[in-house]
Amino acid sequence: MEQFYVDHMFTDKIGGTAGLFLMPVGLLNEHHEPTSYYGVHRNFVETLIIPSTWREGGLAVHGNTDIGLDWNVGVTTGLDLSKWNFTPETAPYNSALDLQNNGIGPMQASHQELSLANAKNLSQYVSLNYRGVPGLLLGGSVFTGNANPAAGAGNQRATLWETHGRWTPGKWDLSALYARGTISNTAQANAQFPGTPNPMPAAFYGWYLQGAYTAWQSGKSRAVPFVRFERYNMGEKYEGIAPGFSPQPSQPLPVNEAGTVFGFWPRPYDTVWTAGLNYYLNPNVVFKVDYQWFRENRDFNRLDLGLGITF
């Protein structure tokens, strides 16, 4: 179940939420329907660094002000780092589609989303968004808390913070986002697996710039070309790597499930250009096409076609 919560307004300005709800982080997590973003797939930063679609169970208080500032603060379930796989037998992804769908990002691999969650350690978050100027959104959020630790790591704290902006003057739609996460005490966990091809990162980050323009419109239909430039790094920093070893495999390892094909594993960081077109038949139906260029993992270059419906 994606969401299941009660939201109640105590006054015209202040309300409360209890249950399973989407985390108010980034630009897409709370508004992730295919008609809400450009391109066939969501951007990599808000997939690998911010684990959209990301929901947790908890309690929250939210409100708005007369100057256009919205706020949201809460206590939720957190990460379970004991789920981290230090000894994968094959490459966790071999294509851009695998990269997005295999849950390999640091928080993708460890967030719990309430179902059978280990709630011994809870996390806290605060989110702010300013909408006081027509067409302008500026905001940010911080999520932090003690996690269920990896075996032998002791206490571990996970933190993710991000800042974002969106400006929609006339036919333009311009947006930017930066996100960075950290995990403490990873050295003790990694030291137990010298030479692991998948060490736990101490820091990870991503950012993107995106521009779109409504080039044609007739009634409810419109054509919107866009371009996006993004950078993600799921392993900006590692700790506890044994001397003589590299955080990324430097020799061929199995890349298929049967373990019969060997090759160099993809790098956990990249710079990606995406250019494409969203054609909205109406506000609830969109046809999409885009092409993506990868600087590091060049075999990931791809052409995508998509259809999105909101109902």
Image: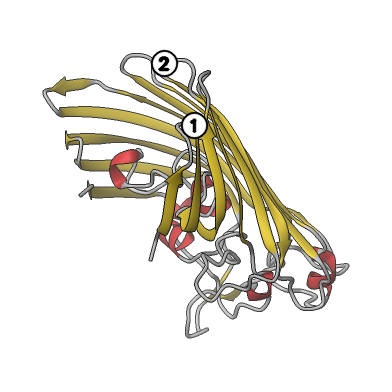
Residue 296 visible at all: no
Mark 1: few, some, or many residues within 10 Å (few <14, many ≥20)?
Answer: few
- Eyeballing the image, is 278 above or below 199? above
Name the kind of residue labelled 2 in the image.
Answer: Pro
Q: In which quarter of the image is residue 201?
A: bottom right
Residue drawn 42% across the image and 49% down it: 301
Residue 192 visible at all: yes
Instruction: Pick the residue in front: 144 or 85.
Output: 144
Residue drawn 52% across the image and 67% down it: 114
- Eyeballing the image, is 73 above or below 139? below
Name the kind of residue labelled 1 in the image.
Answer: Lys
User: Mark 1: which secondary structure?
Assistant: loop
Instruction: Pick the residue in front: 201 or 144.
Output: 144
Query: Where is residue 40 shown, x and y percent of the image?
Result: 32, 47
Q: Mark 1 points at which residue?
A: 13
**Horizontal relation, residue 55 to residue 143: left or right:** left
Q: In which quarter of the image is residue 87?
A: bottom right
User: Mark 2: which secondary structure?
Assistant: loop
Residue drawn 79% across the image and 72% down it: 189
Return the disc, 2 or 1, that comes first in the chain's sequence.
1
Instruction: Pick the residue in front: 263 or 282.
Output: 282
In the picture, which quadrant includes the N terminus? bottom left
Mark 2: few, some, or many residues within 10 Å (few <14, many ≥20)?
Answer: few
Q: Quadrant of residue 150?
A: bottom right
Query: Where is residue 190 shown, x and y percent of the image?
Result: 79, 70
Query: Where is residue 288 shown, x and y percent of the image?
Result: 25, 42
Which of the labelled discs sits on residue 134, or is there none? 2
